[in-house]
Structures are given as C-alpha cells and as structure tokens.
Image (tube, helix red, strand yellow):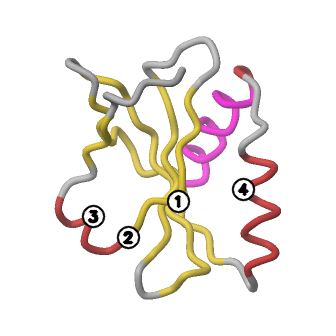
Amino acid sequence: MENEELSLFLGEEIADQTYYEGMLIHPTKPQHGIVVLRKNDHDLTLELYQIKLYPPMEYHIEHHLLTRVFPNEKEVQTFLATFSQLTGNEFWRFIEACRLEN
C-alpha cells in the first residue's frame, strides 16, 4: 500500500524520545502495522509498536511490542532485514510472541 497522504501519530512523549526508522504494514490487512523507532539517546536501541489505521488516513500506536538493544549496527540491520520480510501469518505470530514476552 503506497499513499502519500498517510501519517503516523506517535504522541508527544514517544516522539520526544525516538526517531522514525520504518513501518511494516500487513500485506493483506493494511489497517494493521508495526512501526520501528530508534531511541534518541541510544542509536542501537529499537522500539517496536503495533499500529492501526484510523480515519481519515492516520496510523496510531495501539501497543508497545518490543524494546531491543543491539551490540552493533550490523546486528540492527540484520534484524531489520529479517523483520521487513515477514509474511501475513508471520506478522501476527511476531505480534503474539512480543505480547507473550511482555
């Protein structure tokens, strides 16, 4: 799904502490997604949140899924490359696994 009118609402506290790395939108249910943010104070820390699309065309955070600290940038890139290839069923399994971890 490609739409230049989409936006992402993070909330002030999250926006102040992180910067945008990317989003994974569910391949067949584009109202669901996961946003990946990096911590401002530690570039090797990723924060992942489940997001949902609300009218008119804005994604909002639904749940914090995961905070992961990596030892180096190569490990971050490996995680992101693997994460970006999740299929529809893997997408939901990833969310479920994160919820069970928390």
Q: Is residue 65 depicted above or below 77 in this figure?
A: above
Disc with the residue nearer the chain's start (3 vs 1)? 3
Q: Which mark is residue 15?
A: 3
Q: Nearer the viewer, residue 81 or 67?
A: 81
Residue 57: image x %, image y %? 28, 23
Taking the spot 54% from the left edge, 51% from the top edge, the residue there is: 22
Which amino acid type is marked by label 2? Thr
Q: Nearer the viewer, mark 2 or mark 1?
A: 1
Q: Residue 18's mark?
A: 2
Label 3 near label 4: C-beta < 8 Å?
no
Residue shown at 52%/54% (left/top)?
Answer: 36
The answer to which of marks 1 and 4 sits earlier in the sequence is 1
Q: Say which mark, if any, is on residue 21.
A: 1
For mark 4, give the secondary structure. helix
Q: Is residue 61 above or below residue 28?
A: below
Q: Is residue 96 magenta?
A: yes
- The amino acid pointed to by label 3 is Ala
Q: Residue at x 70, y 78 (%)?
A: 70
Q: Which residues are magenta?
A: 90-102
**Which residue is labeled 4 in the image?**
80
Q: Secondary structure at mark 2?
A: strand
Horizontal side of 83 relative to 66 (left or right) equals right
The tag on residue 78 is none
